[in-house]
Amino acid sequence: MRTTWKPLGVLVVAVAIATPALADVPAKPTFTKDIAPIFQEKCEACHRTDSIAPMSLTTYEEARPWARSIKARVADRQMPPWHIDKTVGIQEFKNDRSLSDDQIATIAKWVDAGAPKGDVKDMPAPKAWPNEQVWNFAPLFGQTEPDLIVKSTPWTHKAGQNDAWWKPMTETGLTEPRWVRAIEVRPGSIKGRKITHHIVLRLQQEEAPDSIAANPVDATGAQQAGTFMEWAVGKQGEIMRPNSGKLMLAGSKIVWDIHYSNGGEDITDTAELGIYFYPKGQEPKFRQVLHLMGATNAGGVDIPPNTVKATQGFFVLRQAARVESFQPHMHLRGKAMSMEAVLPGGQIQILSHVADFNFNWHNSYLYADDAAPLLPKGTILKITAWHDNTAAKKSNPDPNVWVGYGDRTVDEMAHAWVNVTYMSDEDYVVEVEARKMKLNLNTQQQQQQ
């Protein structure tokens, strides 16, 4: 039995969750009946033809040669990549792709039995996956493409070239404020996906100094660009919660920060940003802002040789808010990261802890509707990052050097992207009461079962 803390503003609910016995593991699992459904649900998003994984697992013939490797990878929870510590913090996510204990046991038993194929009649119908080179959000809004498409200027990455960071700025062309209800980001071509490691998009616009979206000023006195969206392997975009959105102002610009790596051939590509607006005159009630939290500058990361070092950063909520997501970002020496809420009364809640960070995967953990923490004005979000600059960290290129903040993969960072939806104190009280009622109702239903 473990206890999961569910953050709910000043209300903290301790929910005891019994660890289930492995009752759903079939006695003689086969690929067609038992394994294929697991792969479709949790693996094929990457492991399919023309996707990012090195092999496809959509058929028995494709999966069988990798059986023992699959067992090893899922047994130690390296695959699917999901690095949230399952013993602390929030455990309900919209995009949870981790395997259950039953699923891991089923795969292991299948491999140990010789990986039998099974009856072809048991094979589920192939899963229809979206085309990564079309605008997949458009049909959700009855459209064929986004309302606004902004492209970066082209970049050519030469075969064998070292990593590069391309940071152009492009105009949005907006002449009036518009509210955003969805964002989609993608490399401009299939070949572009081979070299694009991640894309950070920043929104350059002048906010009122007291705005929740106001950023520090640079040396010229202009506000620095605020984070708008981040794309990485395995991500597509984001859709705002109903009645909430991001605000783009007239004259705004997109500042791109695109990390390109060697693709083995000369490749020219552009990054593309697709924006879906609320209809004109329809203004959402709540504003959402993607914040950069933690150690966000060169002075915040100082990692001596052969050392495990913790780094912290703090962010104060100037209004009541709901935290929508948590995405840690470090480099090769990144070990772990946690996000805690320090409430105005001094109580501390662990919201999420990534215990085994892996630079190859940039997971954004999207909290489920009934689990996204509701936090009062004045709450401090504390981001703690741990770096392992020792030989014990397999991805560490050199444990004998000092490491500081920088863009290069061999440098380090120690921040998180955190989506926050702001609300008034009155709306916060309404949201908390609604959450209480729903949790109480769910508890009653569970007790009756």
Image (spheres, grey):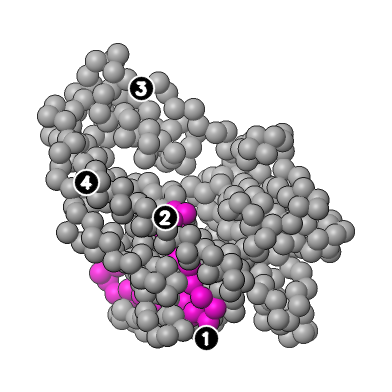
Q: Which numbered dot is residue 438? A: 2
Q: Is residue 334 above or below residue 347?
A: above
Specify which label sits upstream in the sequence, 2 or 1. Answer: 1
Specify which label sits upstream in the sequence, 4 or 3. Answer: 4
Q: Amino acid at mark 4?
A: Asp
Q: Crowding at label 1, few (<14), some or many (≥20) Cα neighbours within 10 Å? A: few
> Residue 44 placed where, x, y %?
40, 35
Specify which label sits upstream in the sequence, 3 or 2. Answer: 3
Q: Residue at x 73, y 85 (%)?
A: 219
Locate residue 407: give its quadrant.
bottom right
Q: Quadrant of the C terminus?
A: top left
Q: Amino acid at mark 3?
A: Pro
Q: Residue at x 52, y 63 (%)?
A: 431
Specify which label sits upstream in the sequence, 2 or 4. Answer: 4
Residue at image mark 1: 299
Specify which label sits upstream in the sequence, 1 or 3. Answer: 3
Q: Residue at x 87, y 59 (%)?
A: 175
Real-space Cα distance between discs 2 and 4?
Answer: 28 Å
Q: Quadrant of the N terminus?
A: bottom left
Residue at image mark 3: 124
Callouts 3 and 2 close, C-beta under 8 Å: no
> Residue 281 placed where, x, y %?
81, 53
Nearest-to-viewer mark from 2 and 1: 2
Q: Crowding at label 4, few (<14), some or many (≥20) Cα neighbours within 10 Å? A: some
Residue at image mark 4: 101
